[in-house]
Amino acid sequence: MNKPDFKNDLMPLKDMLFRLAMRITLDRAEAEDVTEDTLIRVWNKRDEWSKIKSVEAYAMTICRNLALDRSQKREAMNVSLEEHDNEAPDNDDGPHEKMVRSERLRWVHKFFQELPEKQRTVMQLRDIEEKNIKETAEIIGISEQDVKVTLFRARQTIRNKLQKLENYGL
């Protein structure tokens, strides 16, 4: 590996680390702190980068662990993710369709937050960060098969809860 460079090697990871921290901590300020701490820790270990297979996976692991530590210390995690509802694609649907889609997205966010931590993290890495199975397994420290099973269960749980919600009263 060439001489480590903060701007070229670590700054491209900043947004991805922030999104991971945000999903775990559910708090923007806390996620920013976790991201900064992660970047500092990874940079301080730059002399050992040659021994690390993937600096990105290493950074994601540190970020995940720091975010989990901080979120476990916080008792109240009632921060809403409604500010992210605007990320859904905006089609030329009528007001009713937009309202239904917005409500559905709100429920998906709610159900996602209710998942066990492991399922949330796997789903975050695979579906949001678009990591492959191998990268996800390395970051979390589990087998590739466990990633597949965990992702299946997470998606199935959300799907079942949505179906139950939508079929309520039928």
Image (cartoon, rainbow, N blue to C red):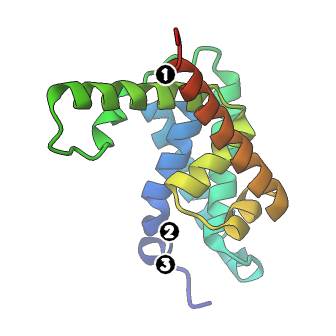
Which residue position is annotated with label 3? 5
Q: Residues within 10 Å of mark 1 (few under 14, many from 20)?
A: few
- Of pointers 1 and 2, the one earlier in the residue sequence: 2
> Element under label 3?
loop
Q: CA distance from mark 3 to mark 1?
A: 51 Å
Q: Residue at 43% x, 66% y: name it.
A: 11
Which residue position is annotated with label 1? 166
Q: CB under 8 Å between callouts 3 and 1?
A: no
Q: Residue furthest top?
A: 169
Instruction: Note whether residue 38 is visible.
Output: no
Amino acid residing under circle 3: Asp
- Which of 47 and 112 lies nearest the eye of the viewer? 112
> Left of 6 or right of it: where is 121?
right
> Element under label 2?
helix
- Which of 37 and 77 lies nearest the eye of the viewer? 77
What numbered label is drawn on residue 143? none
Which residue position is annotated with label 2? 10
Total numbered labels: 3
Q: Nearer the viewer, mark 2 or mark 3?
A: 2
Instruction: Note whether residue 3 is visible.
Output: yes
